[in-house]
Amino acid sequence: MCGILGVMANTPVNQLLYDGLMVLQHRGQDAAGIATGKGNAFFMHKGSGMVRDVFRTRNMRALPGNMGIAHCRYPTAGSSSDSAESQPFYVNSPFGIVLAHNGNLTNTEQLQDEMFRQDLRHINTNSDSEVLLNVLAHELQESAKGFQLDLDTIFAAVAGVHRRCKGAYAVVVMIAGYGLLAFRDPFGIRPLVVGINQTPQGPEYLVASESVALDTLGFQVLRDVAPGEALFVDMSHQLHFRQCAEKPVLSPCIFEYVYLARPDSVIDGVSVYETRLRMGEHLADKVAQKLPVDDIDVVIPIPDSSRPSAMQLAQRLGIPYREGFVKNRYIGRTFIMPGQSIRRKSVRQKLNTVGQEFKGKRVLLVDDSIVRGTTSQEIVDMARAAGALKVYFASAAPPVRFPNVYGIDMPTRSELIATGRSEDEIAREIGADALVYQDLDELKASIRELRPALTCFDSSCFDGQYVTGDVTPEYLDAIERAREGKVASAVVDGGDSRQLDLNLKTSG
């Protein structure tokens, strides 16, 4: 999960890209980068940290040009402190190309071997995004005639990327002297939307991970980029679309609606906020079946993404809704924190209780999901310490029992609290009096009710069904062995948990 932006404008784009990254900061807090194009020259600045920490006035002044791309990074594997893996990435052969990527390739090792043995390209980092860049560069070279690019050549290169790359990828690219390219994998797992801004000088185009970036920057949403589709904006600001995949099937990541995306975004034609309201309605029906509703005094959300679900649940059940936790907004999202010990420490720094909402009450806590269970356990403990008589817990998402290999940090089954445990066992593990999970069919219904044509989802972290068809038990075992080996090594060496996965691919 990362945030990407690409823009072709009539005026300098550096401030526009910076503002867009600030809006997409929730999608990645580990690193940020901006690259701009002016004529045939590129200008780039990137580094580790949040957007506001990476860019200074002097950096912004050094980013001229009316075309650019930007990226905020959240690593699923690899070194979260290695600035060399910040994006965008650049190659100069056969054309000057700068690329930023959101997602995760599942055949990185195979592609790295092909790069070395067949394509004669060298990969400098552990990042699958750099691999993706070099695959695109090679396909452009193979498709180009006399080292000149045209629309057919560019779209043919994207088709070549689709044939070779497996996994999830939403991509923005600048090609020096030619224009702005963007494309989405054949399953549309990660989101990508394009918008337009009509100016007296002509149209401007913005591509982003979420529609909220278009809204806040004054662009009108045109549409989502279709799975397998590529768009290209040439230097004369002409917009071109073409389907580049043979058998595209829209299967967006369902976790975008549960947790990842901002509630004010619209993804693949569906309002994230409205889906979370529907999740609350369906969860309320499940709670009514599983818990003694008369025994619940108050419904309290775990801020922030569970609020819509909790409000709708409370309304449907006729139970008072209260804000029982106050969030310190200057602490990063714990889901993104790299280690268990860091996550535990950050929960207490991030949330504090409003004591009177808990003291002497039987509370139902509502969260968007339970992944590792660390945060849930700490929150239940905080509720009891504040005087709650009983603490029930409800998750707007089903149990997370399987790794996510498409760009979310759920890489090993051993780290998932739901693996090998029943709901009662999970409740005991987090210290709750009872636990209710959303059903997967009801979660899907929450989205389909708003767009019936959306029938397929990547819900692999819930059901273990991987839409790309190439994720085998052996592949998952290899990921787990590598990760666990790095953890053991770090314990022996006394290393920082953020350094654990240097030999694994790093995702956008």
Image (cartoon, rainbow, N blue to C red):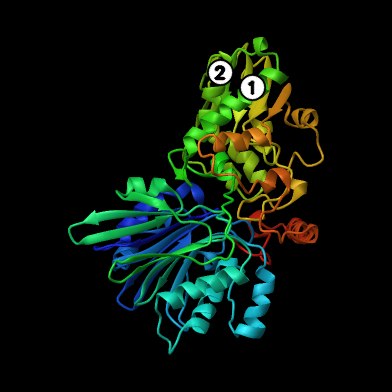
Image quarter hosting the C terminus? bottom right
Label 2 with label 1: CB-CB less than 8 Å: yes
Q: Residue at x 66, y 63 (%)?
A: 106
Q: Residues within 10 Å of mark 2 (few under 14, many from 20)?
A: some
Label 2, on which residue? 316
Mark 1 residue element: helix
* Residue that extends furthest to the bottom in the rendered view of this protein: 146
Residue 359, percent from left and from top: 60, 14
Look at the picture and state if 85 lies above or below 428. Answer: below
Taking 486 as reference, is 368 above or below it?
Answer: above
Q: Is residue 302 visible?
A: no
What residue is at 58 percent from the left and 55 percent from the top? Answer: 249
Where residue 370 sits, quadrant-wise, is top right
**Amino acid on which disc 1 is placed:** Asp
| Residue of label 1 | 285
Q: Is residue 496 left or right of residue 195?
A: right
Task: Measuring from the top left, give residue 37's x and y in whole percent.
Answer: 34, 71
Q: Which mark is residue 123?
A: none
> So how many labels did they put on this image?
2
Q: CA distance from mark 2 to mark 1?
A: 8 Å
Residue at x 67%, y 25% (from the top left corner):
393
| Residue drawn at x 67%, y 67% as measured from the top left | 107
Q: Amino acid at mark 2?
A: Arg
Q: Position of residue 195 (x, y in %)?
A: 35, 53
Depicted 441 relative to depicted 268: above or below: above
